């Protein structure tokens, strides 16, 4: 598409400056922005990381001049948990939705190796929620409750010595995800000279371990001076108290001791005022901006790259979202086809195996059947032989019986002693004997034979 000369003039660096002959009104743009923002309200999310009882709740109450609810934590927590509370605050006509997140049980475990994990997880979860909202087709970012952490107050215990390894490890893990503002808690526990040394020691340890803490911005000239001075005071040594003590004729927040009073808002006593100024009055917007443009941007970039999105192809040519989508889709389809083919191969293999198994079983079954059939045939043959033998026996017997009956009837017909004699002789040849118990059973005896074979007729 060709652009005309006029269009080119109106866009980008080559814009022509022309004087106005009267008031138009676009100088009210900043006011319009302010009004819109005031109407919409602001949101600010603070994460307090520090050991149990280090003074987190007291400092928050002191910072916002109120009493947020919250019970002290026991020291017997099995792990680190993050507890989040949201409050609606109002100062003059500006509304602030403040979310305070507390690390419950931090530093209470014997093994502190994984203490940072739940904190990192929590921060990432908030980024992820925002990213999901951004990626929605129908976005409602203007009414979305942004829970991303804008500032992390890292409470350092007032040991006067050096940072604990837990502090260094945790800050190192968090520094690319959140704006860390380190503070020395309960700083009334250390003397002034010790405190100066402690601050130097902490700063040098942070530098030598490569921990990036939040630097108050010096690019805006209205705040550059104060911010660069304050960067030199980090980490702020703070004292928290909600107790009011009368000093002169004024009631001030202070901690009273038998030997004197520590005034929270006295800059000679501690850095509380510096912290409040830097965190709330001067840099709250920068903290919000840094969270969005630096930390969230990093999270988003890593996440999208992880998902396979990129701005340029391997030849460094621009690669649109559409092209990325298509490349991903093709890659996915290719993988799907490969998986399908693998599954098909596996299925065919399985079927073949099963078929072979079934064939083997069938063969065994046939063999068994053949064996049984042969056994049956043998058995049948034996029985048939036996039957034939018995039938033959029966036939012989029948013949003999008929002959015997014939002889008997001839004898009866002949009668007298001659017949008796002949009869006796015949009887000598074969005798029919009836079984003593069964009338239908009889036997034939042969001369000079002691064997007697009985036959039964039904
Ligand atoms: P958990 O929520 O239980 O982890 O504790 P926390 O870190 O919120 O500490 P909290 O504010 O409850 O304070 C614990 C104790 O320390 C209380 O007795 C406070 O009065 C005391 N305390 C708080 N801030 C300071 C301080 O700046 N100096 C001194 N000396 N004591 C403080
Ligand atoms: Mg607390």
Image (cartoon, rainbow, N blue to C red):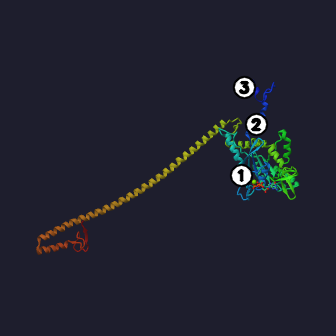
- Of badges 1 and 3, the one in the foreground is 1
Q: Left of 347 or right of it: where is 95?
A: right
Q: In the depicted view, which residue is nearer to us: 448 or 379?
A: 379
Q: Which residue lies at the image location 35% right of the left edge and 58% below the top edge?
A: 377
Q: Measure how far apart labels 2 and 3 are at the Cα level.
A: 37 Å
Q: Measure how far apart labels 2 and 1 are at the Cα level.
A: 35 Å
Quarter of the figure with residue 76: bottom right
Q: Position of residue 330 (x, y in %)?
A: 62, 39
Return the residue at label 1. Answer: 82
Question: Which comes sooner in the sequence, label 2 or label 3?
Answer: 3
- Of badges 2 and 1, the one in the foreground is 2
Count neighbours of disc 1 (C-alpha within 10 A) and say few if under 14, some if 14 to 19, many if 20 or more.
Answer: some
Question: Which comes sooner in the sequence, label 1 or label 3?
Answer: 3
Q: Secondary structure at mark 2?
A: helix
Residue 3 — which label?
Answer: 3
Q: Which residue lies at the image location 80% right of the left edge and 43% below the top edge?
A: 283
Q: Which residue lies at the image location 51% right of the left edge and 48% below the top edge?
A: 351
Q: Is residue 210 visible?
A: no
Quarter of the figure with residue 291: top right
Image quarter where the N terminus lies is: top right
Q: Is residue 83 visible?
A: yes
Cβ atoms at labels 1 and 3 below 8 Å apart: no
Return the residue at label 2. Answer: 35
């Amino acid at each position: 598409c060709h652009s005309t000369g006029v269009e080119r003039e109106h866009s980008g660096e080559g814009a022509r400056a022309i004087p106005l002959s009267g008031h138009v009104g676009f100088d009210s743009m900043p006011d319009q922005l302010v009004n819109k923002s005031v109407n919409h309200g602001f949101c600010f999310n603070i994460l307090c990381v520090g050991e149990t009882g280090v003074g987190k709740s007291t400092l928050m109450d002191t910072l916002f001049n109120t009493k947020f609810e919250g019970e002290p934590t026991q020291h017997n927590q099995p792990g680190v948990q993050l507890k989040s509370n949201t409050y609606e605050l109002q100062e003059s006509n500006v509304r602030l939705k403040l979310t305070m997140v507390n690390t419950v049980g931090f530093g209470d475990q014997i093994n502190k190796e994984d203490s940072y994990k739940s904190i990192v997880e929590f921060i990432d979860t908030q980024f992820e929620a925002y990213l999901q909202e951004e990626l929605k087709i129908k976005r409602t970012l203007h009414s979305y409750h942004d829970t991303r952490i804008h500032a992390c107050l890292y409470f350092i215990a007032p040991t006067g010595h050096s940072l604990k390894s837990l502090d260094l490890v945790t800050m190192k893990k968090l520094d690319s995800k959140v704006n860390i503002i380190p503070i020395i808690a309960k700083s009334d526990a250390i003397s002034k000279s010790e405190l100066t040394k402690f601050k130097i020691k902490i700063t040098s340890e942070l530098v030598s371990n490569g921990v990036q803490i939040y630097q108050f911005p010096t690019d805006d000239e209205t705040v550059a001076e104060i911010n660069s001075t304050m960067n030199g005071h980090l980490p702020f040594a703070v004292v928290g108290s909600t107790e009011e003590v009368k000093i002169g004729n004024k009631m001030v927040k202070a901690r009273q001791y038998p030997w004197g009073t520590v005034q929270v808002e006295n800059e000679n006593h501690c850095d509380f005022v510096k912290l409040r100024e830097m965190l709330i009055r001067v840099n709250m917007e920068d903290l919000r901006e840094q969270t969005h443009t630096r930390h969230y941007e990093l999270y988003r970039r890593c996440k999208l790259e992880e998902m396979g999105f990129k701005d340029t192809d391997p030849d460094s040519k621009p690669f649109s979202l559409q092209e990325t989508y298509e490349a991903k889709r093709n890659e996915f389809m290719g993988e799907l086809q490969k998986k399908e083919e693998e599954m098909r191969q596996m299925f065919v293999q399985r079927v073949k195996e099963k078929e072979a198994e079934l064939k083997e079983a069938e063969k065994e079954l046939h063999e068994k059947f053949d064996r049984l059939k042969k056994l049956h045939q043998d058995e049948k043959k034996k029985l048939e032989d036996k039957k034939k033998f018995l039938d033959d026996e029966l036939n012989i017997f029948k013949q003999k019986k008929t002959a015997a009956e014939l002889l008997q009837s001839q004898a009866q017909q002949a009668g007298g002693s001659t017949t008796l004699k002949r009869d006796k002789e015949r009887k000598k040849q074969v005798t029919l004997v009836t079984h003593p118990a069964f009338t239908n059973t009889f036997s034939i005896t042969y001369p000079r034979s002691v064997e007697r074979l009985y036959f039964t007729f039904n």
